Image: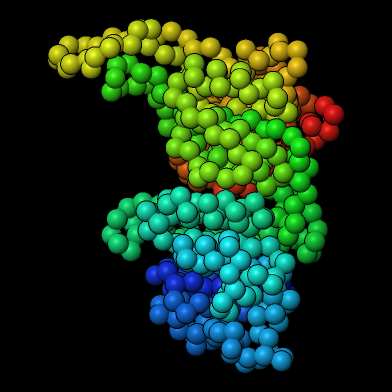
Amino acid sequence: MAESLGLQGRRVAVYVAGSIAAYKAGEVVTLLRKRGAEVRVAMTAGAQHFVTPLTLQSLSGHPVATSVWDAAGAEHGMEHLSLSAWCEVQVTVAATADLIARLATGLADDAVTTTALACPAPLLIAPAMETAMWEHPATQAHVDTLRRRGARILGPATGRLASGREGAGRMVEPAEIVAMVEELLGAAHGLPAGSSPPETSLPREAAAVAPWLAGKHVLVTSGGTREPIDPVRYIGNRSSGKMGLALAHEALRLGARVTLVTAAPPPAPQPDLDVVEVETAAQMLAAVRHAVPATDVLIMAAAVADYRPAHVAERKIKKSGEALNVALVPTTDILRALREDSRRPVLVGFAAETEDLLDNAARKLDEKGLDLVVANDVSATDSGMGSDYNAVTIIGREGVVAEIQRAPKPDVARAVFAAIRTVHREAG
């Protein structure tokens, strides 16, 4: 079967960092070239401990930039400026915590960082590191900074790491990286550079982002609430809060002041982001009611419990060997409670369904007075709750607005805000 040439003639700069996953850079380069792209590579000093420049030169067909002092193939000894002006998209493979930090803080001391700092092209970053390093507040703050500047962060995936441990930090597969390059360039839709994809696809990342939410307040709820049975047990759900966090990051990127009411672990502190940590549905309702009078857009991405125990034991319930019956009563529906407010924001809800997805979502839109509902099938095993990916259908009052196939949650967040922008214009 012939290889797709969807990237024919496109110019891709591949940066390779010093993670053990650097060996996968060769496959990324090979796949890009099979799709017709012209590829040039720059490497950090650490990357050269895992894969040689000669290997990547052979695979790319071009000399590899390994130092700002190596002027091979460049005019006036300015290889990094030559590469930064040449490429249409930048791809960072096996991005370490160190390289992410240097990119975020604007350091420029090697072939990779000098090229990236001088380059206006879209930047795609595929992290690879141990879980503790990825989850460290410093790394997350640097990632948030890069996202706000328009960088696309792909992964990391969860799996077995170089240490033998299991956790988040594994680099996504080369095929996923190449697919995202196609998305960034619009080539997945057979479009030339600079063209816009169809409305049903994800919005293409741009080097600069129009801050159309500047001066606006966006309120996002996130995570799954926990309803206590006793001091140690609770009723909960599988929500990780990743979708809500992606929505909060996207709102910040678009210039908004953001309040994140979350039942999931909070993100690192950052400007223009207020975080309110809650546990139960009642606490989330109180936090939303407090913030909503000054809110322009409310996105209820949290998986809020529909029921709670009627009585909470003051002490741990001891195992007796007998059946335990827990009486449940409904929680207050947050969106329904806001429906009758005289001054209400643009309301966006999520419909997590396992059957009759569109019918159930449309019913929720109507019953709760929403402007938009984001429907997702939570029975899917490769997306949705707990996953880094989602597949959604966005529905408005006139019907389906967009259908987003399986994609990283930050990309889905961009699609949601593209739909919100249309509603916001109509409301304004």
Of 2 and 172, nearer the camera is: 172
Taking the image as drawn, is residue 342 in sight?
A: yes
Q: What residue is at 68 percent from the left and 67 percent from the top?
A: 89
Of 163 and 376, nearer the camera is: 163
Q: What residue is at 71 percent from the left and 66 percent from the top?
A: 121
Residue 100 vs residue 21: left or right? right
Q: What residue is at 79 percent from the left and 54 percent from the top?
A: 196
State which quadrant residue 310 falls in: top left
Residue 83 position, x and y percent, is 68, 79
Vertical comparison of 313 with 185: above or below: above
Residue 357 position, x and y percent, is 59, 27
Of 295 and 175, nearer the camera is: 295
Residue 312 vs residue 391: left or right? left
Residue 297 position, x and y percent, is 70, 29
Residue 99 vs residue 418: left or right? left
Taking the image as drawn, is residue 358 in sight?
A: no
Vertical comparison of 123 with 84: above or below: above
Q: Quadrant of the C terminus?
A: top right
Of 199 and 148, nearer the camera is: 148
Total numbered circles = 0
State which quadrant residue 20 falls in: bottom left
Q: In which quarter of the image is the N terminus?
A: bottom right
Q: What residue is at 57 percent from the left and 45 percent from the top?
A: 270
Residue furthest left as drawn: 321
Residue 168 position, x and y percent, is 40, 52
Vertical comparison of 233 with 402: above or below: above
Model colouring: rainbow
State which quadrant residue 50 falls in: bottom left
